[in-house]
């Protein structure tokens, strides 16, 4: 499968969860928690396959995207930190929706940069064959990818 198609599909799945969450009423705590659990799972898997397979392949092929990739990795760390808090947070907490709203804003910003700035350059630089190879690797890796945020501990 084409790597960029796979990643865009993931983005769409996650945005679907965000939209559903945004439509939940204040009292719909069970629905909010279920959607948040799905966000944690989908985003953890997606971040892992990008970090382990896609980003290193881009760094290798496109030296000029180095800064974009380093920034993307930091954005992943922020998102995963929020996910680790969201996992632990009681849906009844007064800041539950606020925390998820900040996650949604930050992931949407990140996804927009990937789709509008990074992916078109990657598509130009890597051939169809290489993109399919990376996509197949990611599809395979997704089957055993972590379903909870990894690498949240500070390491700077
Ligand atoms: Fe990403
Ligand atoms: Fe992504």
Image: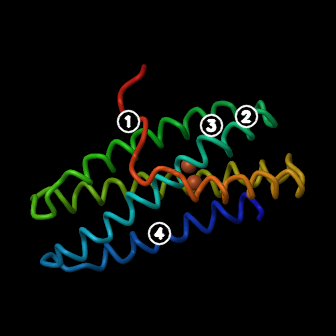
Which residue is labeled 4 in the image? 15
Disc number placed over residue 89 in the picture, else none = none
Look at the numbered disc 3 and give the secondary structure of its residue: helix
Q: Which residue is mark 1?
A: 152
Instruction: Identify the residue at image location x=55%, y=70%.
Output: 12
* Distance in Å between CA atoms under marks 1 and 4: 22 Å
- Report the side of 47 relative to 116 (left or right): left
Q: Which mark is residue 69?
A: 3
User: Which image quarter has ligand 2?
Assistant: bottom right
Residue wearing tag 2? 59
Question: Where does residue 31 sit, x and y in percent of width and height?
Answer: 24, 77
Horizontal relation, residue 14 to residue 30: left or right: right
Which marked residue is nearer to the observer: mark 1 or mark 2? 1
Q: CA distance from mark 4 to mark 3?
A: 22 Å
The residue sitting at 39% across, 45% down in the picture is 80
Residues at marks 1 and 2, CA–CA distance in whole angstroms? 22 Å
* Rendered-image quadrant of the C terminus: top left
């Amino acid at each position: 499968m084409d790597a960029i198609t796979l990643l865009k599909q993931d983005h769409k799945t996650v945005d679907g969860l965000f939209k559903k969450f945004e439509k939940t009423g204040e009292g719909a705590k069970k629905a909010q928690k279920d959607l948040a659990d799905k966000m944690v799972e989908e985003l953890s898997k997606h971040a892992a396959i990008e970090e382990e397979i896609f980003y290193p392949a881009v760094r290798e092929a496109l030296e000029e995207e180095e800064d974009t990739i380093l920034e993307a990795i930091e954005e992943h760390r922020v998102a995963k930190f929020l996910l680790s808090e969201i996992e632990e947070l009681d849906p009844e907490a007064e800041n539950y929706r606020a925390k998820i709203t900040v996650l949604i804003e930050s992931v949407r910003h990140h996804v927009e940069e990937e789709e509008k700035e990074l992916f078109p350059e990657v598509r130009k630089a890597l051939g169809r064959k290489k993109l399919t190879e990376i996509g197949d690797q990611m599809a395979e890796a997704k089957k055993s990818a972590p379903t909870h945020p990894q690498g949240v501990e500070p390491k700077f």
